[in-house]
Amino acid sequence: MNFVGLFNYWIVMVLMMIGFYIVIAQGNLVKKLVGLTLFQTSVFIMYITMGKIEGATAPILVEGEALYSNPLPHVLILTAIVVGIATTALGLALVVRIKESYDSIEEDEINRKDQEC
Amino acid sequence: MELIINMGLLSMLAMTAIAIVRIKDLFAVAMLAGIYGLISASFFVMMDAVDVAFTEASVGAGISTLLMLTTLAITGRFEKADKKSRTRFALPLVLLTGALLIYGTLDMPSFGAADSPVQEHVAPRYLNDSAQEIGIPNVVTSVLASYRAFDTFGEVIVIFTAGVGVLALLMRTDLPPISSVKNTASMEEHMVLRIVAKMLIPLILLFGLYVQFHGEYGPGGGFQAGVIFASAFFLYAMLYGMNAARKVIDSSLVQVLAALGVLIYGTTGVVAMLSGKNFLDYSVFSEDPVHAQHLGILFIELGVGLTVATVMIIIFFTFSGRSQVEGERD
């Protein structure tokens, strides 16, 4: 088995599963958003890993350099990061509103209050 | 050597993530998430993705931590302990999914291989022809602002929409007038911080402009510049209080500017259409095709930078305004 060649992907999967675990197993809404961020970053790492070429340099053209890493994943992820923070902000805004109406951001307490009504 | 650093950084990422799962103090979680962002930015530098690293360092380690902390000021610092019944179901499910995904990676091309499928198709074209077609050294900017400008347009609209969404959810129209409330800054008593920050703010703004207009030649561009530019205003708000910041930034003007950024981007495309070319075909701006590309990229990056900076300012000030009102109510 090619340990060195696949190590990056394994870490990506580990990070992705940690994010997934936080989202499904932990009840605090802020913590869930952190879990989503972990999940999201693991996908970023996967894309950037795939774009890397051994011995290449950053895709900024200079004289006398022949080998560059793939610029396409960089473009996709660069915009995804900024979109990611914008959507996380939207999620946090929802959490703030939930806190104001339910006085709690724990999922089970919110469910209980919903059922009481 | 590179390989060792790569593996070291990835292991640190995994350890930070495990710490995030286990810690119940959300303040520590927010800080760890910032560290996670910084480590992944270092990893992106190792992977030659300098533009991405730049963005992740300013967004993942900077703004997202700040937003998280502002939210925690409203929602409270500690979370409840996990429920046993939930972990019992979640753990096997996560382990099974993880095992299947890792089994799936066994077919992936080896890390760093030059002949993997990702490196074929369009990437060689971008690298070989962009010097003649676009004429700027940073290929990432060429792809972002010219070859795939339509994608970027969609992303700018998503960011704008998120800004509008945050405003719709959290905006207070009943904020007291500036003069009537006492100015409370969280770090008011730190004299050294205040003076150092005062000297730093113009430099940060200048650096933001440099990143904006130098993005064609080095790492940078509208997305990074917008975030850096906005962070100068955050720094001012944190050190001198929200009221002082509200005097500097007219919130309705910022909202108009956010829309203006999207408008500049869209207009660049529509002007091309009105001249009989395709949407976002820059060749209408000048006789010389390379010069036309430069002009088109300049407009596009301006639109991106304007929208990103103003949306970040809108998001931060809406959150802080909310926590200020909360604080007065308590």
Image: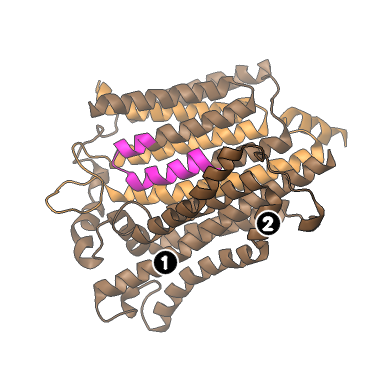
Chain colours: A orange, B brown
Which amino acid type is shown beneath numbered disc 2?
Arg
Quadrant the C terminus of chain B occupies: top right
**Farthest left residue in view:** A64
Which amino acid type is shown beneath numbered disc 1?
Ile
Q: Nearer the viewer, residue B11 or B101?
A: B11
Q: Position of residue A88 (x, y in %)?
A: 58, 44
Quadrant of the image occupied by residue B310: bottom right
Q: Is residue B158 visible?
A: no
Q: Is residue B292 visible?
A: yes
B223 up-or-down from B17: above or below? below
Q: Position of residue B319 (x, y in %)?
A: 67, 47
Instruction: Name the side, left or right, on which A114 lies relative to B207.
Output: right
Q: Nearer the viewer, residue A38 or A65?
A: A65
Q: Are marks 2 and 1 in contact (CB under 8 Å)?
A: no
The prevailing secondary structure element of the residues shown in magenta is: helix
Disc number at residue B246? 2
B223 up-or-down from B4: above or below? below
Residue at point 48%, 57% (across, down): B155
Q: Dot 2 lies on which element?
A: helix
Residue at point 55%, 26% (across, down): A21
Q: How dense is the environment of label 2, judged by Cα within 10 Å: few (below 14), some, or many (20 and up)?
A: some
- Residue wearing tag 1: B300
Quadrant the N terminus of chain B occupies: top left
B34 up-or-down from B222: above or below? above
Instruction: Name the side, left or right, on which B176 lies relative to A81.
Output: right
Q: Nearer the viewer, residue A57 or B246?
A: B246
Region in magenta: B42-63
